[in-house]
């Protein structure tokens, strides 16, 4: 059994991890963490800093995001491996939904497990729901975890304690 876990570096995305841990332990599953670095997100970061879009700035932003994602996923995989799980990770580039589904196919995943970000209303209309689109477009089963305020607060406390 192989479980693909798309993450985005946020505590909300990682709120699915206790559920994945329980499943992986019960099913002796391999866990593959993936983070998608999106060109659109890099452009938004540059725009929010009030900088113009130059090729050099964009390349720098993509390198920085990739480095942060790689370091984070590497640490996460090391922690899970030390606890007895078979894990690996990768950072990919592109549109999140397509990349998640393609990665699941390449890795032979049996399940995609991810959290929702709980967006609604205008925000959801503007940005859509990656989780909803993965469910709609993937041929694989998708486990969606909707974080509660309590689960995110507990995760935040645990991550600060681990630091």
Image (tube, rainbow, N blue to C red):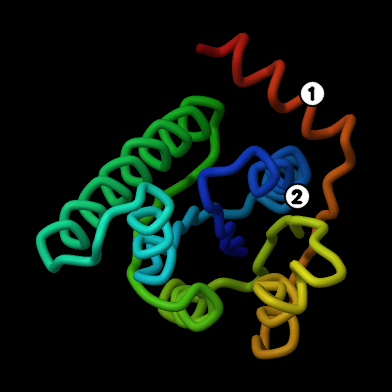
Circle number at residue 140: none
Residue drawn 53% across and 52% down? 8
Q: How many marks?
A: 2
Q: Earlier in the sequence, mark 2 or mark 1?
A: 2
In the picture, residue 135 is in which quadrant?
bottom right
**Near-viewer residue (43 or 86):** 43
Q: Give the CA separation, mark 2 to mark 1.
A: 20 Å
Q: Secondary structure at mark 2?
A: helix
Camera-nearest label, 2 or 1: 1
Q: Position of residue 59 (x, y in %)?
A: 16, 60
Residue drawn 62% across and 54% down? 29
The relative height of residue 111 versus residue 16 in the rendered view (above or below) is: below
Give the residue at mark 2. Answer: 23
Give the residue at mark 1. Answer: 154
Residue drawn 69% across and 61% down? 113
In the picture, residue 53 is in which quadrant?
bottom left
In the picture, residue 161 is in which quadrant?
top right
**Near-viewer residue (57 or 71):** 57
**Near-viewer residue (26 or 100):** 100
Q: Is residue 75 left or right of residue 13?
A: left
Residue drawn 54% across and 39% down? 85
Q: Secondary structure at mark 1?
A: helix
């Amino acid at each position: 059994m192989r479980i693909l876990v798309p993450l985005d570096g946020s505590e909300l995305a990682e709120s699915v991890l206790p559920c994945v841990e329980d499943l992986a332990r019960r099913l002796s599953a391999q866990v593959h963490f993936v983070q998608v670095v999106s060109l659109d997100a890099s452009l938004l970061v540059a725009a929010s800093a009030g900088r113009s879009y130059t090729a050099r700035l964009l390349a720098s932003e993509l390198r920085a995001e990739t480095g942060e994602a790689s370091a984070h996923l590497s640490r996460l995989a090391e922690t899970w491996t030390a606890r007895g799980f078979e894990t690996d990770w990768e950072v990919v580039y592109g549109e999140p939904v397509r990349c998640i589904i393609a990665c699941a196919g390449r890795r032979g995943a049996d399940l995609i497990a991810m959290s929702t970000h709980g967006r609604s209303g205008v925000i959801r209309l503007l940005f859509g729901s990656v989780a909803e689109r993965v469910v709609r477009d993937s041929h694989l089963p998708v486990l969606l975890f909707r974080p509660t305020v309590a689960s995110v607060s507990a995760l935040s406390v645990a991550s600060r304690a681990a630091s």
